[in-house]
């Protein structure tokens, strides 16, 4: 009887252990960080008790038979095995947790790097990946909340703060960011509650608390004042409010800034088409608004408070409404002396929204020839190139808007002339820095910027300044290196494409700086000939055709690097532009390098490639092909390989005056003369075609070579 009672007690204890362990396992698998943490703690305590021997069986082996003992031993072994498995699982979980903690910290670091670069979407992605590794890491929630704030995703930021508080109900950053998010959503009461919680946690943060509460009060007063101002303007039926009545109300002196800002917003909504634009002008709208002392004072200050920012934005949006497509209004706005001074200041404002609306206004002007003329005539644009290029480092639409504006402005010759003034001192240092830090800037905008600088090189003075700038060439090489090593993105490829075009433009000049960098540039281009992007290959060949004439050493290295065979392959299959660049490059190589000539003869034994090019409609291609032939005929046996071809007829046609370009006639005549000199049997064919007179006249070219 005693044995049966003991067995029952042991069985019940075992079942309780199973229930308890089951609950622990469920807690360990919970998605709630708090429940999971408690389960880990309880498991560790249970394992400590087991280690102290409290889980050992205390059966009375004298009162049970051998069969009962066997059963008890099986139960004990089963229970101990279960506990051992649980212990192993806990240790495995601890190891995984440490590993996941390391991975989460690494992802947090990557997220912080992206955040510091302004790439908030990537930062959010990295923080999210970190949370997948460790769900109860509060700093990942608060960091992600901050990134959501930057993207104006305020509700998501609040949600992240709430999760951070589940991990730690005294998380200061969570309450701080939550307060900011509620404020942005104009939920002032909730914002105050968050800041009060922050003070409850740490009374030493009283100064921060006061600053936060003052900010809430300021925003709430601003909202009430704006609402009151709008109510005053909209007291009657909106459609009945006339332009004249609105302007009369705005003409009241010494009102609050927000009074004018609200009124200007209402006025802007009234302007729908050219009729309202004209009514604004004929009712003296520009003078009433632009001559107002309060408006002028609020607009002109460099560092603006909230009300002054609102005023600036209201005015910029109004100016867009009244000037869009209206040339007379555009003229009146730019001829106002205050606006003339304020526009560059607004463009350089530290407030992104003001910059954005300033760019939008200026874009209206830049889209038409008349508008651009107004800007050039009434604005000092000497610093605008620098100001607009600075937007390349901005990771939003302002960058592309600035580049589009700049693309339109460079259509004006007067703007290019003004760009010369500060190019070397201010613009080029900024431009080269952007090239060197291409990974950190807006790459599509940078590609546009490089293209714009290339277009500016049509101005000879600008091209000379850039071509002689050592830092520029170093930056070009750095960008090409970066693109080749890590530039698989579309942004990088576009940057590479445009910088190769810029190098081609600058290589039109001849100076010591270009000669110094010719070898390095040609090496980069040889590497790029293996690119899968046909546009890059074409541009690389184009650069070679421009840069190799600057350095015999560069030609020698290019030939040793196998450029001749590669050029011949491109000439066999390349398009018009590629062929034009390739044959010019081949002409440069064969002109001064005997190895290049020998490789052409060896690789194109019957001169199929060059003869095909002689039939091109592009006379520059024909002239360069004839030049290459003339140089290759200096190789022993080369002329003999063409005995059964129609080369004499082809060269005779070009040398006899069929070509419009004199250089084509000369190159063809030289090639014909060298052909007959190297292999006299070609003279028989020449006589059959009655071409001896042309050959005799060409001998003067041969003697000079």
Image: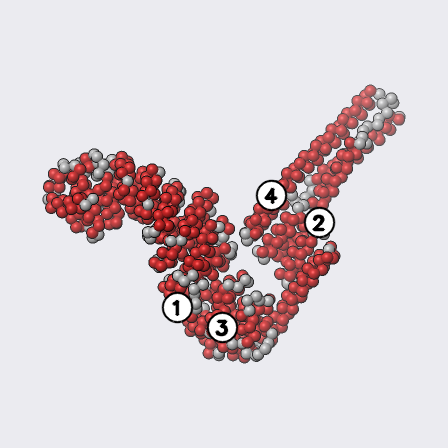
Q: In this rendering, which labeled residue sits more in front, label 1 or label 2?
A: 1
Q: Is residue 608 above or below residue 384?
A: above
Query: What's the residue at 80%, 32% (across, down)?
Result: 52
Does 90 sit left or right of 519 as displayed?
Answer: right
Mark 4 or mark 2, which is nearer the start of the sequence?
A: 4
Percent of width and height locating residue 204: 73, 57
Which quadrant of the rendered structure holds the C terminus?
A: top left
Mark 1 or mark 3, which is nearer the start of the sequence?
A: 3
In the figure, residue 31 lies in which quadrant? top right
- Residue at mark 2: 168
Does 637 sit left or right of 111 as displayed?
Answer: left
Q: In this rendering, which labeled residue sits more in front, label 2 or label 3?
A: 3
Mark 3 or mark 4, which is nearer the start of the sequence?
A: 4
Does 106 sit left or right of 20 as displayed?
Answer: left
Gap between marks 1 and 2 measured at Cα: 62 Å
Badge 3 element = helix
Contact (Cβ within 8 Å) of mark 2 with mark 3: no
- Residue at mark 4: 106
- Residue at mark 3: 338
Query: What's the residue at 35%, 59% (across, down)?
Result: 461
Does 168 sit left or right of 646 as displayed?
Answer: right
- Residue at mark 1: 373
Q: Nearer the viewer, residue 127 or 17?
A: 127
Residue 471 in sight from this viewpoint: yes
How packed is label 1: few (under 14 Cα within 10 Å), some, or many (20 or more)? some
Badge 2 element = loop
Gap between marks 3 and 1 measured at Cα: 19 Å
Contact (Cβ within 8 Å) of mark 1 with mark 4: no
How many numbered marks does the figure carry?
Answer: 4
């Amino acid at each position: 009887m005693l044995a049966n009672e003991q067995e029952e007690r042991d069985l019940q204890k075992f079942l309780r252990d199973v229930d308890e362990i089951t609950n622990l396992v469920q807690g360990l698998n919970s998605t709630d960080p708090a429940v999971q943490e408690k389960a880990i703690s309880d498991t560790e305590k249970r394992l400590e008790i087991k280690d102290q021997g409290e889980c050992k069986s205390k059966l009375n082996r004298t009162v049970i038979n051998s069969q009962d003992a066997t059963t008890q031993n099986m139960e004990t072994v089963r229970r101990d095995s279960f506990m051992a498995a649980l212990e192993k699982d806990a240790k495995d979980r601890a190891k995984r947790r440490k590993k996941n903690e390391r991975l989460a910290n690494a992802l947090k670091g990557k997220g912080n790097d992206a955040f510091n670069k302004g790439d908030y979407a990537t930062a959010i992605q990295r923080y999210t990946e970190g949370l997948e590794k460790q769900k109860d890491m509060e700093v990942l929630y608060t960091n992600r909340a901050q990134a959501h704030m930057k993207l104006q995703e305020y509700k998501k930021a609040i949600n992240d703060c709430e999760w951070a508080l589940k991990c730690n109900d005294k998380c200061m950053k969570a309450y701080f960011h939550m307060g900011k998010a509620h404020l942005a959503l104009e939920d002032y009461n909730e914002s105050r509650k968050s800041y009060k919680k922050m003070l409850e946690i740490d009374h030493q943060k009283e100064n921060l608390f006061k600053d936060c509460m003052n900010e809430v009060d300021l925003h709430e007063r601003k909202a009430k004042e704006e609402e009151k101002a709008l109510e005053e303007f909209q007291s009657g039926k909106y459609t009945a409010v006339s332009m004249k009545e609105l302007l009369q109300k705005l003409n009241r002196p010494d009102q609050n800034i927000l009074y004018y800002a609200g009124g200007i917003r209402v006025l802007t909504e009234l302007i729908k088409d050219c009729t309202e634009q004209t009514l604004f002008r004929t009712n003296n709208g520009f003078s009433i608004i632009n001559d107002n002392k309060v408006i002028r004072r609020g607009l002109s200050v460099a560092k603006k408070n909230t009300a002054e920012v609102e005023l600036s934005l209201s005015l910029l949006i109004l100016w867009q409404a009244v000037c869009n497509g209206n040339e007379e209004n555009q003229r009146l706005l730019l001829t106002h002396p205050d606006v003339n001074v304020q526009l560059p200041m607004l463009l350089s404002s530290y407030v992104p929204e003001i910059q954005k609306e300033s760019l939008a206004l200026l874009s209206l002007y830049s889209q038409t020839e008349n508008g651009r003329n107004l800007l050039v005539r009434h604005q000092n644009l000497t610093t605008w190139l620098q100001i607009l290029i600075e937007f390349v480092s901005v990771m939003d639409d302002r960058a592309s808007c600035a580049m589009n504006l700049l693309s339109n402005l460079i259509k004006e010759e007067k703007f290019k002339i003004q760009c010369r003034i500060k190019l070397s001192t201010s613009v080029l240092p900024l431009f080269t820095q952007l090239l060197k830090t291409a990974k950190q800037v807006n790459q599509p905008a940078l590609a546009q910027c490089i293209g714009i600088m290339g277009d500016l090189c049509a101005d000879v003075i600008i091209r000379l300044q850039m071509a002689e700038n050592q830092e520029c060439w170093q930056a070009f090489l750095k960008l090409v290196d970066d693109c080749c090593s890590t530039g698989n993105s579309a942004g990088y490829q576009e940057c590479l494409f445009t910088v190769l075009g810029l190098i081609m433009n600058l290589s039109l000049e001849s100076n010591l700086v270009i000669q110094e960098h010719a070898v390095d540039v040609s090496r980069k281009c040889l590497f790029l000939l293996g690119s899968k992007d046909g546009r890059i290959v074409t541009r690389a060949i184009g650069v070679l055709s421009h840069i190799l004439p600057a350095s015999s050493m560069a030609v020698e290295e290019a030939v040793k690097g196998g450029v001749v065979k590669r050029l011949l392959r491109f000439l066999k299959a390349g398009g018009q532009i590629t062929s034009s660049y390739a044959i010019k490059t081949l002409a440069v190589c064969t002109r001064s390098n005997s190895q290049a000539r020998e490789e052409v003869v060896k690789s194109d034994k019957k001169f199929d490639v060059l003869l095909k090019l002689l039939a091109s409609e592009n006379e520059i291609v024909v002239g360069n092909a004839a030049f290459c032939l003339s140089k290759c005929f200096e190789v022993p046996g080369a002329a003999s390989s063409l005995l059964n071809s129609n080369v004499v007829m082809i060269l005779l046609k070009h040398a006899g005056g069929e070509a419009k370009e004199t250089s084509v006639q000369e190159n063809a005549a030289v090639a014909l003369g060298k052909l007959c000199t190297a292999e006299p049997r070609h003279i028989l064919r020449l006589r059959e075609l009655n071409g001896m007179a042309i050959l005799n006249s060409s001998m003067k070219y041969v003697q000079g070579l």
